[in-house]
Amino acid sequence: MNNKILTLDASSPEELSAKLTVLQKGGELASARFASLAISGPQVLVRPFELTKVAPKDIPTRLQFEAVELLSLPASEVVVDFQALHTASDKVTGIMLCAPRKLLGDYLAALKKVKLTPLSITSRILTGIDIFLKSGEPPKGRSCLLDLSRENVIGLSLLCDKRCELIREIP
């Protein structure tokens, strides 16, 4: 059994399906079992968060409320993931990702159709930040990351001492 991991990037489930079709026709899916997927698009939102006076068990609920407001969808139709980056006695800061549940389901269906098991699904902009932070010692103070690799979209991240202060995709 082959355990090859495909790294994929898509801005819609349709784009992912098209890329998978090309890989399948080229025989490249035959040796792959897993996928690591970076997604982007207007409904995939990534935001830094700062919560004060919140119990750790209440963080998901508070972020769910924020995601509902950002996406203008009912809570049952929203998926939220987050990473707490800094915790103090009265404050938690981190990064959250939210997207419509149906959108995530459509991405998963595209992977399932070609028998790929997802190992990770995250935002493209978070993938860039992760690579930057793991590439060596980041500069002290503020750093600005610009992702200009896609047409008509700029990824902008402002980091201060490994803490995310701003993160946006600008069409």
Image (cartoon, rainbow, N blue to C red):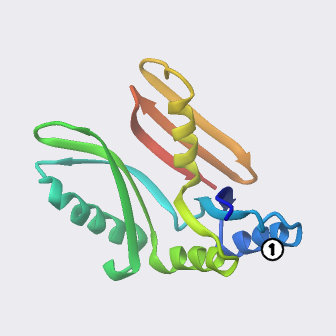
**Quarter holding the N terminus?**
bottom right
Frontmost residue, 77 versus 154: 77
Return the residue found at the far top: 140
Frontmost residue, 142 versus 87: 87
Q: Position of residue 4 (x, y in %)?
A: 68, 56
Q: Residue at x 62, y 37 (%)?
A: 146
**Quarter holding the C terminus?**
bottom right
Return the residue found at the far front: 1
Q: Is residue 157 above or below residue 109?
A: above
Element class at badge 1: helix
Residue 28 shown left or right of residue 133 in the figure: right
Q: Residue at x 12, y 54 (%)?
A: 55
Q: Is residue 12 above or below residue 158?
A: below
Q: Residue at x 52, y 68 (%)?
A: 43
- Residue ID for mark 1: 21
Return the residue found at the far right: 26
Q: Quadrant of residue 29?
A: bottom right
Q: Is residue 157 above or below residue 20?
A: above
Q: Position of residue 68 (x, y in %)?
A: 34, 72
Q: Position of residue 80 (x, y in %)?
A: 37, 65
Frontmost residue, 95 versus 121: 121
Frontmost residue, 129 versus 109: 109
Q: Position of residue 50 (x, y in %)?
A: 26, 46
Number of labels in the image equals: 1
Which class describes the residues within 10 Å of circle 1: few (<14), some (14-19), or many (20+)?
some
* Mark 1: amino acid: Thr
